[in-house]
Amino acid sequence: MNRSRFVLDDECQQFLSVVRETAHTYAKTIKRGSILYRAAAHNEWARLKKLEREGKPELNRVLRNLIPSPAKPRRMLPLPERATEGRVNPKGIPCLYLATDAHTAMSEMRQWIGSYLTVGEFRLRRQVEIVDMSVETRDGLYVWYDIGRAFSRPVARSDDRAEYAPTQFIAEAIRAAGFDGILYRSAVGEGSNVALFDIASAKLGRRTVHEVRGLRYEFLP
């Protein structure tokens, strides 16, 4: 993060070499047709005709005849040419961030109460081979446990973007090893996140809109 970004020293090069060589230990297959979820902090507004049919035009005017509806399909996908950077991808290189369940996908957005989220179901177009970082340590490779924690750790919008650099390097090493993506535990939901390097490997299906009703935090002394 703080020493070198584009030209790695021998120690970092050796570390990434070991990552590529041992990644197969944590390989996992997700079958074609599997459903994963993606949330977006966007929604549309649809016209409401029901109140007029029920003979309540004055109430209809108060509501401005609008109800929340799902975001348009284009808002559910990363922009191929203008992708923002994330835990797995550098700026300008799109990555499809998904989750194993809808609740985890929405929790990852960390939105405020009263806001609306659109959840899309994404069906895998093909079988994908990923590196599963949610598993426990195996064969003494404790470094993979630390790598998994690094991917799961949330980065606030106010944090320095340099926080992303180490996991981006590791993700590119895994991609260079021939894998389609990475699975890692969510720090805010009960499920896991799945980051796919090819945004065309899953197809958007049904979309639903949800209102954030509450947040829950627990604290230890």
Image: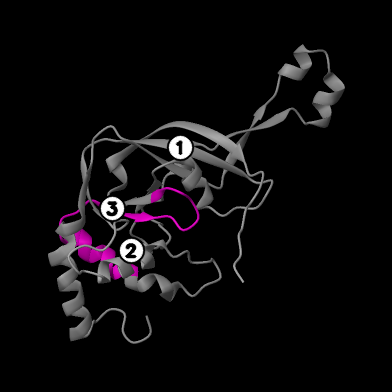
Report the front residue among 215 and 42: 215
Which kind of residue does numbered mark 2 sit on? Answer: Gly
- Earlier residue among tags 2 and 1: 1
Question: Height in image: 68 above or below 172?
Answer: above
Please, what secondary structure does the residue beneath circle 2 have? helix
Please, what secondary structure does the residue beneath circle 1 have? strand
Question: Height in image: 75 above or below 221?
Answer: above
What is the x, y in percent for residue 157? 54, 66
Question: In the image, what residue occupies the spot 37% across and 68% down?
Answer: 150
Write down the residue under mark 3. Answer: 197
* Distance (Cα) linking label 2 and label 1: 26 Å
**Mark 3 Cα within 10 Å, few/some/many (few <14, many 20+)?**
many
**Mark 1 Cα within 10 Å, few/some/many (few <14, many 20+)?**
many
Query: Left or right: where does residue 128 sit relative to residue 58?
Result: left
Applied colour scheme: one colour
Which kind of residue does numbered mark 3 sit on? Answer: Phe
> Which image quarter holds the N terminus?
bottom left
Within the magenta stretch, is there residue 25?
no
Write down the residue under mark 1. Answer: 120
Question: In the image, what residue occupies the spot 27% across and 63% down?
Answer: 171
Question: In the image, what residue occupies the spot 53% across and 66% down?
Answer: 156
Q: Which residues are magenta?
A: 167-192
What is the x, y in percent for residue 91? 38, 64
